Amino acid sequence: MKRLLFLLFGILLIIPSAPVMGAGGDGPPKDMMKGVFVAVDAPSRTATFINGQTDATLILTLGEGMTAGDITLDKKVMVSLDKHAGEGIIKDVSVMFLDMTVGRVAALLLIGLIGGLLSGFIGFGGAFVLTPAMMSLGVPGAIAVASNMCHKFPKAMVGAYKRYKYGQADIKLGLIMAVTAIIGVQIGIRIQKYILSQWGNAGSNLYVSVVFVLVLLLVGIYVFYDAYKLSKGGGDPQTPKLAQALMKINLPPMIEFKVAKVRISAWVTIPVGLMTGMLAATIAVGGFIGVPGMIYIVGASAMVASATELIIAFIMGAWGSLQWGMSGLIDIRLTLLILAGSLVGVQLGALGTTYVKDHVIKIVMASVMVIVAVSRGAKIPGYLADLGLRGRLEPQMASLLEGVSFWALIAALGFATVIIAAAMIKGMVDARAEERVKSLEAGVSHG
Amino acid sequence: MELNEFDKDMTAATFAQAGAHEDARSMMADSGTKQPVRPLAQKKKPVLGMVVFGALSLSLYVGLMVNQGWIMDVFTKGGPYTFWPLGTAMVFSFIHGAFASNILSVMGIEARKH
């Protein structure tokens, strides 16, 4: 067994130092420069740029459609160059670190609170809410992903340690899953890069959106079905039949997971980890596959699977944060402000689960997944048009789809927040009334 | 330091975060089984913990915002400087998490006891 782990780590070390980021996008962008613009010359359409890493002074040319006003002077910026257009031609400029106004601080606290509430109540949601919301505040995508990841891993670490002490986390399973998931991330990134080089940004967006919509719809519909069964009083806590059948495959090396109480072939465990990583590299939510994979394929109980997922989340999150941090992309102010909101939100959400029935949690979970799938799905026609796979969208149609995409996301958040708040308030009022009745009854029987 | 309540809530929160609602529920509900059972009305609220962790947390956040200029310069240098943002996130998550847990308890927002 130790040999297998060493082998896995060996593979990991051999893999060239490609960007590994755990759950979140496609790693720190490598073809981007960080630095400061010190001057811009509108007539010649050039700008003087000091590269932050090399201290070299460069004269860059404004790309098509850019004006001198797009260049922010004396602030740290990220510049991506349009390599197809020629040498030193700017494609895009974004200010790396925003000024923290009172409005932005309040918005970040609120975003963190909602993200945390969703995470605490339904087990995920941070990735859907936090990164896009930060981006809509004007934070560049790479900084949003990096700062979000840095706020997640300390929470996972605390949880993983506690659950290990409770004897629920299977370290061996967690390590194997994490290492194979990191390898899966590498594979996922290579697929992404291949698609990007073949079909450009639109192809990449289309691929991510299609996978996202398919996974969310499939899992969402399954969770709805599970919720329906639970509400009818069903539910089967036994080891799933598929896992039972897979345990019978005696293909060496066999691995024994003591905490999970499972003995299963490495040929079953490793693909689950690889898939988790590949999905994490594509849609930033590997846990969707990791937890069900450990339950339905490896045969771990839901308790062990969710505890072990925390080890995976911690290792992948720390690894990813390290990679992004090495490129200097973590905005610690964003990380800590969303952390402030989400630490309150996550505990409120978790408390909320004690006041509702299991199927309510699953209904909220499934609804959010399906609405988010609609939000992402509305973007697909646009990407298809960009690729020339269908005619150009009418401007009216394009703005309608944009609207659907945006408002579906807002609806998902609003819906979940209202349901959670209503369920909590109703539950608390009921619980207090119940306690009052009990104490009155006790008083009557004593008196 | 009243870390017990915090530990319990953080663990339950992470359980719920990972989708194990049943575990979170039972964990938050069964605190009374390991400690001497007190009637609900007389349960001591962690006011001291809330004040101490709140003050600590607030001073950390004020410190961050006041010194954001040089902090952002140092923390985004990349390379070995990466350990600054990573370590800072961990320290803040412990202290602010303890405050968040305590303030919810003081406000009377607690897990349902079964």
Image (spheres, coloured by chain):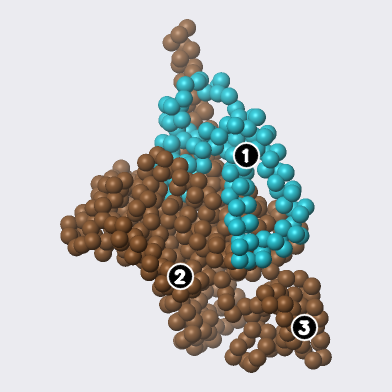
Residue B51's x, y, as percent? 68, 34
Of mark 2 and mark 3, the one earlier in the sequence is 3
- In the picture of the structure, the residue carrying the numbered disc 2 is A282
Query: Circle 3: is it few (<14), some (14-19), or many (20+) Cα within 10 Å?
Result: some
| Nearer to us: label 2 or label 3 | 3
Question: Where A407 sits versus A29, above or below?
Answer: above
Real-space Cα distance between discs 2 and 3? Answer: 36 Å
Q: Amino acid at mark 3?
A: Thr
- Colour chain A appears in: brown
Mark number, residue B99? 1
Q: Report the chain holding disc 3.
A: A
Residue at the (60%, 29%) spot, across then down: B46
Is residue A349 or residue A184 the one in the foreground? A184
Q: Which chain is cyan?
A: B
Real-space Cα distance between discs 1 and 3? Answer: 47 Å
Q: Quadrant of the N terminus of chain A?
A: bottom left
> Element at badge 3?
strand
Question: Where A194 sits versus A209, above or below?
Answer: below
Image check: B89 left or right of A367?
Answer: right
- In the picture of the structure, the residue carrying the numbered disc 3 is A48
Is residue A305 or residue A138 the one in the foreground? A305
- Among the 4 quarters of the image, the one containing residue A289: bottom left
Q: Amino acid at mark 1?
A: Phe
Residue A372's x, y, as percent? 49, 63
Query: Circle 1: is it few (<14), some (14-19), or many (20+) Cα within 10 Å?
Result: many
Residue at the (51%, 58%) spot, across then down: A318
Q: Report the chain holding disc 2.
A: A
User: Do the dots labelled 2 and 3 sit on one chain?
Assistant: yes
Residue at the (55%, 62%) spot, across then down: A322
Viewer can see residue A113: no
Viewer can see residue A379: yes
Residue A248's x, y, as percent? 17, 57
